[in-house]
């Protein structure tokens, strides 16, 4: 079993062979992956050492102390948090070798082609069609709310391959080349002024069967792995005590005493306690994740994260008064990645509104919590045994 001393020795060997101060950033990332220090819980040869996931912090702290470069998790967060664990769980050895290294080293950026105009909260209702044609699949349809599609080379894609069976059973999961003929990305401008999201049109896009992930018709099963990891990636992000959105507000409180009132003080204390509770629960969730696959508990953390972000960003606006109503720049931008805390107070307030929608709406996640965590009866499903093609639209 890999120990803390083993990891520190491996890090020291990496730093000696590739000094951060003189090694190009890309070369260092490549070397770190090849040394098994990228994600140490992954198998050997795939950027890991088959070690305990909980020991990753040992590697990260040693490298940070040495001033070593790291990959940009804002830019490749979908690849790291969603694509990689799904490819590892369901991919072939050839897919592992082809996709995981360039994903972690930032050579290839990923996006997620799941939601559609008629299939958002009810993802299993999706209608993007994939039809087999020899060794290829021909895909036609539309996806929406795709973060970072304009910067991505690859996408995780769920399609409808059999419309004659109930909706959850006729789906198939693919790895889609975003540069392939027939893929069109259009910006969706948000309330913040940015176009972080996109809509993606797929017009007879050919995807080789070698880029199918999992069995034909088992796309829902594969997608569940992605979705569980997505909720942990969004809501279970590690942040320090007094960090995150609440940390932004407490910084303003400390630096601007003239803005304080007793009522705002009481509300800030309440949010701080909630933030600390979320931090501790998120830490426990990551410990559970280190011992196995993520479960439905990630949905509860994601709901709490969304509500806390929205409440804290609203409190910041109130604390700043008239100053908080100003907005720095409405210029349309297409950013490289998602930044919940970016720019100034007005941006944070508006961007936080999306937290309760992206990665599963809070309403849907509460159903998951009720059914899969609390064991409450599920809602009646009249479409359970109805073929997808016969569902009303």
Image (tube, rainbow, N blue to C red):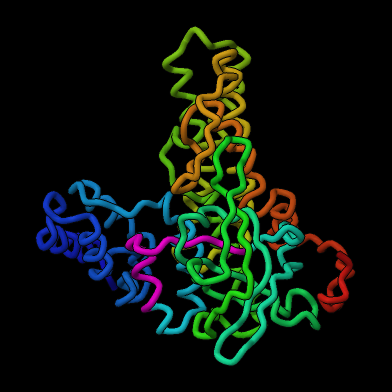
Q: Position of residue 263 (x, y in %)?
A: 63, 15
Which residue is more in the foreground, 201 or 390? Answer: 201
| Residue at far bottom of view | 134
| Residue bounds of the magenta highlight | 97-113
Q: Residue drawn at (58%, 37%), measured in percent from left and top?
A: 351
Instruction: Please indicate whether residue 251 sits to the left or right of residue 120 in the image.
Output: left
23, above or below 264, in the image: below
> Which residue is at a point 37% across and 68% down the rendered structure image?
41
Picture residue at 54% right of the left edge, 11% below the top:
260
Which part of the image, by quadrant, shows the N terminus? Answer: bottom left
Please report the residue visible at 54 percent of the width from the left and 64 percent of the height from the top.
294
* Numbered marks: total: 0
Q: Nearer the viewer, residue 319 or 175?
A: 175
Q: Position of residue 357 (x, y in %)?
A: 66, 48
Q: Is residue 11 above or below residue 292?
A: above
Q: Nearer the viewer, residue 101 or 282?
A: 101
Q: Is residue 216 magenta?
A: no
Q: Is residue 50 visible?
A: yes
Q: Quadrant of the C terminus?
A: bottom right
Residue extending farthest to the front is 181
Q: Is residue 109 magenta?
A: yes
Q: Position of residue 47 (x, y in %)?
A: 31, 70
The answer to whether 351 appears left or right of 367 in the picture is: left
């Amino acid at each position: 079993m890999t120990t803390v001393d083993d990891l520190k020795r491996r890090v020291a060997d990496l730093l000696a062979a590739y000094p951060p101060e003189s090694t190009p950033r890309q070369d260092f990332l490549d070397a770190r992956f090849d040394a098994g220090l990228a994600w140490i819980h992954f198998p050997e040869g795939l950027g890991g050492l088959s070690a305990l996931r909980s020991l990753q912090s040992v590697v990260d702290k040693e490298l940070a102390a040495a001033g070593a470069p790291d990959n940009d998790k804002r830019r490749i967060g979908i690849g790291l948090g969603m694509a990689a664990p799904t490819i590892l769980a369901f991919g072939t050895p050839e897919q592992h070798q082809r996709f995981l290294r360039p994903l972690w080293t930032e050579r290839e950026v990923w996006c997620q082609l799941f939601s559609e105009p008629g299939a958002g909260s009810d993802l299993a209702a999706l209608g993007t069609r994939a039809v087999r044609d020899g060794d290829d699949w021909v895909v036609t349809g539309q996806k929406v709310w795709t973060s970072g599609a304009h910067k991505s080379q690859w996408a995780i894609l769920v399609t409808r391959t059999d419309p004659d069976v109930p909706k959850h059973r006729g789906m198939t999961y693919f790895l889609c080349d975003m540069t392939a003929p027939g893929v069109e990305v259009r910006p969706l401008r948000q309330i913040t002024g940015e176009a972080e999201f996109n809509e993606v049109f797929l017009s007879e896009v050919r995807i080789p069967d070698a880029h199918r992930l999992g069995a034909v018709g088992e796309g829902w099963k594969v997608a569940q792995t992605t979705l569980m990891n997505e909720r942990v990636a969004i809501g279970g992000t590690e942040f320090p005590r007094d960090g995150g959105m609440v940390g932004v507000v407490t910084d303003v409180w400390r630096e601007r005493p003239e803005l304080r009132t007793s009522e705002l003080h009481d509300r800030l204390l309440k949010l701080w306690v909630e933030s600390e509770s979320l931090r501790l629960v998120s830490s426990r969730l990551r410990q559970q994740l280190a011992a196995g696959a993520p479960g439905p508990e990630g949905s509860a953390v994601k709901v709490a994260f969304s509500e806390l972000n929205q409440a804290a960003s609203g409190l910041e606006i109130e604390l700043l008064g008239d100053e908080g109503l100003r907005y720095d720049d409405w210029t349309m931008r297409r950013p490289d990645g998602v930044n919940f805390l970016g720019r100034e107070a007005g941006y944070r307030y508006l961007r936080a509104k999306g937290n309760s929608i992206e990665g599963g709406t809070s309403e849907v996640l509460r159903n998951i919590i009720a059914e899969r965590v609390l064991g409450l009866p599920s809602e009646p499903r009249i479409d359970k045994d109805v073929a997808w093609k016969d569902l009303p639209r």
